[in-house]
Image (spheres, rainbow, N blue to C red):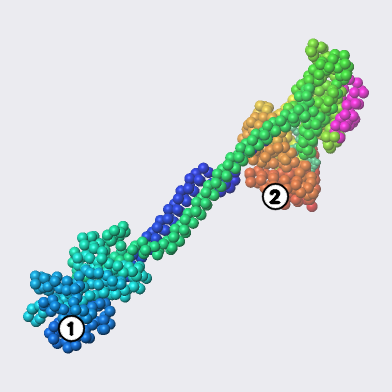
Amino acid sequence: MRKPLSFEPKGLLTRLLAGRGVSAGLVLLSLCVLAVVWYFTVIRIDNEKQLAIEGSIADSRNVAAIVSANLDEVLGKTLLYARIGQSMLNGEQASSAYFNPLFNGDAAYLRVAVFDARARLVYSSARQKSEPELSRLINAGYMQSLTGQPEQAVSMIISPPSNRDGGSWRVPLLIPLQDGKGELQGFFAAILDLGYFLKTYQEVSVAGSSRIEILNAAGLQLAELAGGILSGGSNYAGQPYATFLLAGKGDGLIHAPRPGDQVALVGVQRRLAHYPLAVVVSRDPEVLLGKLWPAHRQYYLQAMLISLVVLLLAGGLISLAHRRRYLYDQLLFSEREKSGLIHQLEQEKSRAYQLASHDYLTGIPNRMLFYELAATELSRARRSRNLYALFFLDLDKFKLINDTQGHAVGDALLQEVARRLRAAVREYDLVARLGGDEFVVLVSEIRSEEVVAEIADKLVETLRAPYPDLLGCHVETAPSIGIALYPRDGQGIDALMANADAAMYMAKSAGTGLYRFYDASLNAIAVRGLELLGRFRQALKDDEFCLHYQPKAALQDYRVVGMEALIRWQHPEHGLIYPGEFIGLAETHDLVQPLCHWIIEAVCRQQARWREQGVPLVPVAINVSAKQLNDERLIATVRDALQRYRLDAGLLEIEVTESCFIADLEQARQTLEKLRDEGLRIYLDDYGTGYSSLSHIKALPVYALKIDRSFIRDIRNDNSDGMIVASTVTLARNLGLKVVAEGVETREQLMHLKLMGCDEVQGFYVQRPVPAAQLEALLQKGRFEFA
Ligand code: C2E
Ligand code: CA
Ligand code: CA
């Protein structure tokens, strides 16, 4: 019966994907990828922002430097104009009509005026009678010149813008004028349009989104240009935005939001060296970074795209894994289901086969199974030199019994007949019911026709014995048996069946409880078998047996290396009888042991005689049958004979067939080992017809293999036989066994075997078995001479 299938899915990927840890692994992996992608995106954006801010600071620094330098220059000019005003007071300036910075191209000066020390207007570039706006300054400046510190007295007073008109940021300036002795001479005043001044940076402010502011020392915003628009007037006094004004000189960064703003500006301040003014250039970081946004948005998009792809991929793989897992489970399930079904089917099949192939009534094989088994058995018979016999049985009077005693009794009779037949033959012989009262028995490996006849006798006897209690009825019957022999009466089972059937009819017509061979001539032999059996013991006593010897030749130099003793029966009536006819009988009737002892004695006697005659001795092999290996006296007999005739143990050899190992391997092995230890060589006879493998033989104390003659016969024609012999020679060599070929009948066979590396040969071509006397010359010569 087939084993239920076990299912294992193939493929690493499948198994991996089917694993439960895969999903978790994929999730982890994709999270890692996402983390890396986003980390680098954020770092990149941050870096770019940082760089942008640094670049912007550098830009602002430049702008602040330029603006403050220009402002410095403008204010420097104011000092120059103040000097002109002073010379005017001194009366050195002849024509005042030209003293107008506007005419000089200094458009930043809206107007200039000169006052004397009593604050009376001396000159106005606007040709005004009075300059109230500037006069107010003088009050402050005058007070200062009287009370203030000397260095401040000469310095410039810059007021917050007084008013705005038309987009101009008017910043009044006052410079007290002193003569060489330090006496106040008068004042120079001017209105500087910082708006105009800043407007020159319109471009810078718009393009760079910069806010340019000019602050005074008090933190007041004098003017501002942002996005091209002028404004001003914010007061940063006390604000963090303007703390730099409190610190020392120099320029620096501003880290504070403008009052009212949330975000800290990116600003740079620069203070003028000689005037209490500071220039602040700042940029709104939002605007600055806003410019980077398109690029950054691109980065974000890329990162999102990659994330999406990773997520989709991971999702896809996970769902694939789940799908695989699902399919795998399904497959496993269906495989289990399938193998369960197969198992069930096979059980049912074998039950159906049992039902279909066995007889429902008796339980023994039916016709169908018998044909099947018999065909297999006969294919094995082809190699065998023994007989296979088909017994066809039919019960006499069965129909009568069935009709008179009832079907139930008939059935019980058939069951009992089947049971008795089974018990009468060996376990591996086939017994079957063909139907009705017809039975067949196939017995294999029978030594001779006489043994077949004995088996037939036995079958008749068993079935003829009364059936005292079949459902309370006493029944008596007897079989008629027809016998067909393989291969003589048919090569196939069909022919054998037909012929056995025909023979059965002959038996039936001859009477009741009889058997008949299909080959009628054998019916006489069966009779002779019984006769031989009856005379066997007497024949041993009367010395009717004799031995023929068949030599063996070494293939290398054709030396005579040994002989085989073959038994013959010199019958007073039938003449010379060959062992095929009586060995089987002797074996089944426990006569083979006395025969064997006779042979050992005879061989040893012959060797001693040859020694006396001065004939060179070679070992003589005797054939020992399976049963003799169970004989405890065998070894003692051998030892005793060798001693009595003062023979070396090496002069006696043993030939056994594989059938010796079938019955009781251990017993056979022990006996053979004792014989070997005694000094006898063991040959495995008829090698190749049995079932032994060489490795099996290795465990036995075998010296050499005798390849059966059926292989030698066709060694030239039949490829497979040639192959078997060749490989047997090679394998035997590897196991340290010698190889002998028997049945060599032609020179070609001999040459072929020599080529194959066979060690020794035996056969009609070398020498037929002959009585001892005919071999003396050969033994003297010691070798064969083949032409
Ligand atoms: P075996 O042991 O295989 O003996 C070889 C048989 O083959 C002998 O037959 C021999 O005459 C025959 N033979 C030898 N060369 C050739 C050949 O070239 N061609 C052919 N076709 N046959 C050849 P034999 O003497 O009739 O013996 C038959 C069998 O009887 C032996 O087969 C052996 O199994 C058995 N037997 C013979 N003598 C004894 C014995 O003393 N004791 C026992 N137990 N069995 C014996
Ligand atoms: Ca033999
Ligand atoms: Ca043989």
Q: Position of residue 50 (x, y in %)?
A: 34, 63
In this view, the mark in front (2 or 1): 1
Point 43% across, 53% down: residue: 35
Task: Tell me the element at label 1.
Answer: helix
Q: Nearer the viewer, residue 555 or 38?
A: 38
Say if the magenta span includes residue 1.
no
In the image, what residue type sits under mark 2? Gly
Span colored in magenta = 495-522
Q: State whether residue 681 is above or below residue 267.
A: above
Q: Nearer the viewer, residue 645 or 351?
A: 351
Q: Residue furthest right?
A: 509
Say if the magenta span includes residue 502.
yes
* Cα–Cα span, label 2 and label 1: 143 Å
**Quarter of the rendering containing residue 281:** bottom left
In the image, what residue type sits under mark 1? Ile
With 595 as the anchor, is 137 left or right in this view? left
Point 74% across, 39% down: residue: 689
Q: Position of residue 71 (x, y in %)?
A: 25, 75
Q: Quadrant of ligand 1?
A: top right
Point 63% across, 46% down: residue: 734
Q: Position of residue 403 (x, y in %)?
A: 88, 16
With 100 as the anchor, is 40 left or right in this view? right
Q: State whether residue 360 is above or below residue 697.
A: above
Q: State whether residue 313 is above or below residue 451.
A: below
**Quarter of the rendering containing residue 617:** top right
Q: Which residue was labeled with disc 2?
A: 757
Which labelled disc corresponds to residue 84? 1
